[in-house]
Image (tube, rainbow, N blue to C red):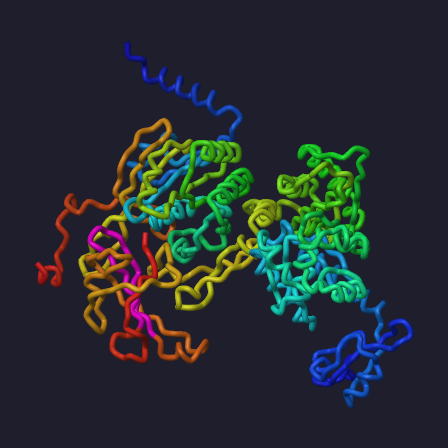
Amino acid sequence: MPTAPVQMDSLREQIRRIEAGSRVSCGFLPFGITDIDDRLPGGGLALGALHEVAGGANGAIDGAAAALFAAGILARTHGQVLWCMSRRDLFAPALAQAGLHPDRVIYAEAGSDTAILACFEEGLRHGGLAGVVAEVGKLGMTPSRRLQLAAEASGTIGIAIRRWRRQTEAADFGQPTASTTRWRVTALPASPLPVPGVGRPRWQVELIRARAGESADFEVEACDEEGRIAIPAKLVHRPVATVDGSERAVA
Amino acid sequence: MGRSAPSLDTPVVLIGHEGRRRVVLAADQAARRAGLTVGMPATKAQALVEDLVILDADPEADGAALHRLAVWMQRHYAPLVTVYHPDGLVLDISGVAHLFGGEAAMLKDMLRKLASVGCGARIAAAPSYGAAHALARCVATTTYILAEDKVSEALDLLPTAALRLPGEMVAALKKLGFERIGELNATPRAPLALRFGSMIGARLDQAYGRVSEPLDPIIPPETPHVRKNFAEPIGAPETIARYTGVLVEQMAAELEVKGLGARKLDLLLFRVDNHIEAIRVGTSRPVRDVKRLTKLLCDRIEKVDPGFGVETMTLTAFVAEPLTYRASVSALGEPEVKDVSGLIDTLSNRIGEQQLYRLTPVESDVPERAVRRVTPLTPASGASWPAYWPRPTRLLDPPEAVETVALLPDHPPVAFTWRGMRRRVARADGPERIFGEWWKSDIECSAVRDYFQIEDDVGERYWLFRAGDGEDQKTGSQRWFLHGVFA
């Protein structure tokens, strides 16, 4: 016998309250795009939780799109951000262009993955930060569980950028971890322009795993100066644009 | 001596009494070049050099100055420092070198700071005090670092005089044919002990690190200092942590009386075998908060080895600064600024102060010069980089050379090969021309870089530049480089 939706909703609410236990309720950070937010339980990225982002294709090694995706998320929060890394190739002006102001970011350079994870956890436990980002390669079940619990206890959002030295190691991303969501961001050809040049970059954003949610794929336009991603306008559904002289000449 | 000091190229010697003879106790570089040596009779020195400046030695003032230097070294570098009269300082740098970026960087830093106050120094780091003493005095380079497993290799070749033995004993050993430490080490101990006592054996063991050698650290006067003795030695980390808490409470009370907050703290654990283990922590602002200081210290307890037990613990706030109370909320309606200095202290004690930073803009068009590191607690400047030029998320340092097919002078490449993979260019934007900063160096006077944002046919975006304007060889080599990866 199908249960009435109202009853289901109240049951879900009850389960959620039991699961929450003593953890701080800290809300969600919506992307502001209905298509993505609808797929995420709670209507956005959970704030007191661990999220994983990796790059697809060459991005698994350089982690450029993943870093900018994370910067865009943190740009929409308030307060200081801790960014832990082992390789010093991150270029701060790009983060500033995604809306993450340089005054907000504290960088911690640690030598090894274990040291990075220790800094990551310390940052999450502190509770005074808006978010913590760490660029790590290996992330096992136990460390990720610790990080998830630390994030839950303080209500700080944690983003692990998974980045490997070699393409073959990227298969590690299939291993289970305790993170709440898991994303893969791959660069796509930029939005077409009517003139020669590179338009607004586009990404293929795959939600590979979401706790209590389903996975999904999106094609989005990269972060603007306030850290917002956007769904590209589908040109085919638009009314015919007024064609100017130059375009006619090309056609 | 101020203005009346003799110039650098005047030979100067210090004269003192050795028994009833007046001998040279110290000679400067110019005097040594003129052939004077330490231990030479004063009259002979006077006869050898015509315009010799002779001053009376003042060992007490020397000792006091060395002690002051030791206090300064202790404040800057390591918790355990002792004075080795007449000419040495001993620092136990175990567990502190990482705060300076490794031993080599730490030694270099010491040398530079000492040179800036006019002190020449020779510094050696070794697994044992004896070895470091010998190497600092016998190796020609100003800094020397001895690896853990190279001790006997290095020590075997050094002269016996480096072993901290009395002069007459060294002379007697020389008469017997022992010139190097290695020869002495290979000789049976019993006959040596019969003739010279147990000292040679003890010094050999200390130098080779076979027995530990306790240091008697200096405690600078007037620093807040608390101490706890135990009737029974303690060893469990939880017990050490508990008593650390007790000591911090006492310290906080003492600091409150003086109106101070701690900037740097040393926790010394005196073990039953006379060895001292040390924990040094620093804070970015003066702190008197018991919980926070205890956490900082307890964070490092796992790094110390309690051995057979700890019988005394001391806590010293060797750098303390005035601490005033301030309101936690500045004004109504202003957003609350969360204090992260506690986290910064924890992290900088763990990974080193240099490794924790914020980046701030520098007015420069050259991408690699556009960022500068500042300490994490620097007040926010509000400045950011200009937003109108695209900048890559990852910047390669140094830029990597790529092979390209491109039309000159101002077209983007049609294809390029990077890290062994050929990529076809689908779209490109540019050039963004960046000129060298002629006020920095002559080479940059005419240097030009043309940057292109390039998208390959699978959609990955790169930042390429050509060194030069594509026409004039003076502006650069006209070769192509990949400088960054866009998201």
Of B9 and A182, the residue lying toward us: B9
The quadrant of the rendering that contains the N terminus of chain B is bottom right
Q: Nearer the viewer, residue B447 or A42?
A: B447
Magenta segment includes A237: no
Observer able to see residue B286: yes
Q: Position of residue B421 (x, y in %)?
A: 24, 55
Q: Position of residue B365 (x, y in %)?
A: 39, 68
Q: Residue furthest right?
A: B20
Q: Nearer the viewer, residue B467 or A246?
A: B467
Left or right of B215 in this view: A112: left
Residue B465 image offset from top left, x and y in percent: 30, 66
Main secondary-structure element of the magenta-colored stretch: strand
Outermost residue, bottom direction?
B50
Tell me: residue B49, above or below residue B296. Answer: below
Closer-to-camera residue (B71/A28): B71
The residues colored magenta run: B448-467
Choose top left, top right, bottom left or bottom right for residue B166: bottom right
- What's the residue at 41%, 57% (across, down)? A91
Q: Can you say whether A62 is above or below B44 in the image?
A: above
User: What residue is drawn where x is 43% and y is 20%?
Assistant: A15
Splitting the image into 4 quarters, where does residue B251 fall?
top right
